[in-house]
Image (spheres, grey):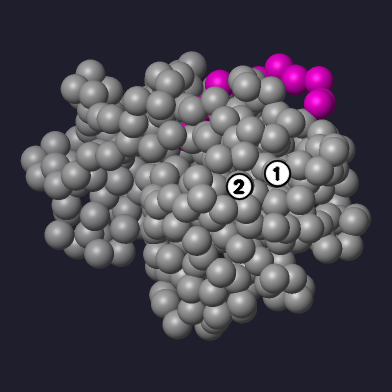
Amino acid sequence: MAVVGAGVIGCGIALRLAQGGAAVTLLDPAEPGAEASGAAAGMIAPQLEDCAEGAFFEMSVKSRAMYPEFVAEIERLSGLGVDYVQCGALRVALDDSEAAAIEAIASRQRAAGLRAELLSAAQALELEPLLSPRIRAAVHLPDEHHVENRRLVRALAIAATRAGATFRAKRAQRIALRGSVAIGVETADELIEADAVVVAAGAWSSLLDGSGLKPDAVKPMRGQIVQLDSGAALLRKSIVGEAGYLVQRSDGRLLLGSTYELAGFAKRNTAAATAKILEAAIQLCPEIAELPVTACWAGLRPYTDDHWPILGPGPISGVFLATGHLRNGILLAPITARLIAQAVLQGSPSADLEPFRYERKYRATARPSK
């Protein structure tokens, strides 16, 4: 088996394939997690989406439920801690319009059986004293968590290697075909034969010749993040507002994000976006204004027109697709790895992937919330 792409999705799939007895080669010209997986904030937060129904939301909630066991396994196999924090999140409203919107979302999620506690401004400030006194209301989502995504990908890569997967620091140029069947992956100087090829190349997936994907099926969506240093943890929970979020790392780093830009493959930080990110975060927590900026970075998320991932068999026999996760790759890593490995090894995954097929009709999309 060959897996193209060594982000959190590719590494997770390589691990599950290797555990299933397959000989696995994982190809990526960069180190594991060098692209979107390493650039993320690591939120495991399906309830921060503006919905509470549909196959994608159901899959996201199931994947979140898998995380405690998933993390315990990966830490045991790799010997690395991944800083998985079960802290909850606060979705905050700064005016009456935002308050009405988050109240409606919370109501729909409670109706779906999820925990979403509506708080007054006073209750929110008691929970997070650094919040702005301007806030009008908040929703406490106690089951939303986050993980140090860079550590997670490193741990997954180690676990996959120990399970028998082989990493090759090479760029996959095309999927080799014999007739209409995939027989492996071609690099600049060799053919790596494989009974099946999994395309998990993130924003670059549509550029892989032979995948069968349309050139615009997956596009790069730039997201920028600013990092502050608070010295020690200031926030107990992730804070999310209409225009941005704050994610507190246990070592005192504070991640602020993010942007949502169709800017091609220009992976860079811009002055205008940095200013907007900082302004949005300071509006939510004014006391962070004097903290030093210690880093900025950008990542290219794999975007599809309806914001749903592309999962399952592709248009070419022997090709499987695991891409288009947009801002939810970290969240969906456990369930994607399981389902794609089942599809490859058993021919039938334990959940219906029909809604995520590459040739589906694209559905209307909601505004991104993180």
- Sequence order check: which comes first, mark 2 or mark 1? 1
The residue nearer to you, when weighing 302 against 321, is 321
Describe the element under mark 1 as helix, strand or loop.
Answer: strand
In the rendered image, which residue does mark 2 sit on? 186
Question: What residue did someone put label 1 on?
Answer: 176
Could you tell me which secondary element the residue under label 2 belongs to? strand
At a point 74% along the width and 71% down the height, the residue shown is: 22
Q: Is residue 62 visible?
A: no
- The residues colored magenta run 359-370
Closest to the observer: 72 or 101?
72
Q: CA distance from mark 2 to mark 1?
A: 6 Å
Q: Residues within 10 Å of mark 1 (few under 14, many from 20)?
A: many
Q: Indicate yes or no whether the magenta region holds residue 205.
A: no
Among the 4 quarters of the image, the one containing residue 148: bottom left
Q: CB under 8 Å between callouts 2 and 1?
A: yes
Amino acid carrying mark 2 in the image: Glu
Q: Is residue 63 above or below residue 263?
A: below
